[in-house]
Image (tube, rainbow, N blue to C red):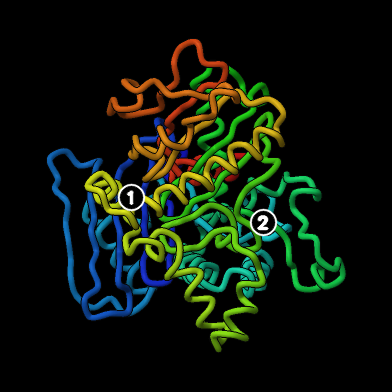
Amino acid sequence: MTTPTRVLVLNSGSSSVKYQLLDMRDTSRLAVGLVERIGEDTSRLKHTPLAVEGAETREFEGPIADHAAALAAVAAELAKDGLGLDSPELAAVGHRVVHGGKYFTVPTVIDDAVLKEIKRLIPVAPLHNPANVMGIEVAMELRPDLPQVAVFDTSFHTTMPESAARYAIDVATADEHRIHRYGFHGTSHAYVSRETAKLLGKAPAEVNVIVLHLGNGASASAVRGGRCVDTSMGLTPLEGLVMGTRSGDIDPAVIFHLNRVAGMDIDTIDALLNKKSGMIGLCGDNDMREITRRMNEGDDSARLAFEIYVHRLKKYIGAYSAVLGHVDALTFTAGVGENSTAVREAAVAGLEGFGLAVDPVLNETRADGARLISPPAARVAVAVVPTDEELEIATSAYALVRG
């Protein structure tokens, strides 16, 4: 009997499902796709069968009522390529789950008890965990015999010491309501910190890395010897760096002020800080390419937004240098981190005292894969490492089910 080697990775959002099918013998992608606008008449499915020579991307537009219908459509597309969910070569389904709280510290095979705990965490992840649960439940119905593995965004950060993970509020209140710094983007930080060590020719246990995951959502982490010791996001993904639409760090009293003086209710303030702040609140754009273009053409609001963004980055680089004591590498990843030469250059500028510098030519050179952009003699390596959260999820799920 053939040993199953394929893993289907599902990332279920509130109105979308991203998926990839990987063969873990060589970590190759067999198929990738996206279902978006679930629940609307204008739903869209885009499927690319990479394992079929000469096959082209297929697209469907029309109503997809819910996540059950979305996954049924995904299964149908995979089946057309001989990659159906009924295949004996499928070893597991790996699910991205945003919030695992303090309980889930490693990837976990999902059973009724695990699913119940993920649901119990919905109050601290109301935007994400419900969608993750829907994806899990539908996949379990489609293949009840197949291991379903949850890989948690928060698990990489559970190694933070209490001195970094606790907020300075009443302990009893914090414990009762699970108010704790959990961190997010953990699959990305785990993958990128290990790949950075590989780039330096060292084992993860030998390397201290500051990882900057810079996309529309953005977070920083301090990784000592392969273990996270601090991260910028907290109870929710709102804390930390300036992001596309999120404020990041802010005086908590701003909330009270807006309520008392501006008459805003909590839901309005929540929407303001999560959806109408950050770069879009500062200059009306949350695409760093457009912001950089505007800045280079003399737009003052775009320039100020860029400067605020970079100022926050520098603060975290400095803080995490202090937390780690010794830094071997600063690594940029995700959409902005991997593609914005201007952000990378500005974030490191003036930090020569920390041993940080970028080589202008290396920084501007486009290349696939992990690479160094610091001068050869730099005390601290500056790297660009493309993140691969799907591969991290697939690798974790496969290792778990293979024992």
Residue 289 rendering spot, x and y as whole percentages: 28, 48
> Quadrant of residue 172 in the image?
bottom right
Residue under the image location 41 percent in, 27 percent down: 370
Image mark count: 2
Query: Which residue has dot 2 on it?
Result: 182
Q: In the rendered structure, which amino acid carries the disc numbered 1?
A: Met
Q: Which residue lies under the disc numbered 1? A: 288
In the depicted structure, whether residue 270 falls above or below residue 32: below
Residue ID at (73%, 45%): 160
Label 2 sits on a secondary structure element that is: loop
Q: Which numbered disc covers residue 189?
A: none
Q: Quadrant of the N terminus?
A: top left
Mark 2, other Cα within 10 Å: few <14 / some 14–19 / many ≥20: many
- For marks 1 and 2, the one nearer the N-term is 2
Q: Amino acid at mark 2?
A: Tyr
Question: Residue 328, image x and y in percent?
Answer: 60, 23
The location of residue 8, given as percent across then percent down, is: 41, 51
Q: Is residue 68 left or right of residue 254?
A: left
Left or right of 290 in this view: 268: right
Which of the pair 383/294 is nearer the observer? 294
Residue at the far top in the pictured view: 377
SS under mark 1: helix
Q: Quadrant of the C terminus?
A: top right
Q: Nearer the viewer, residue 171 or 57?
A: 171
Q: Look at the picture and state if 172 lies above or below 364.
A: below
**Horizontal and vertical percent for residue 208?**
64, 28
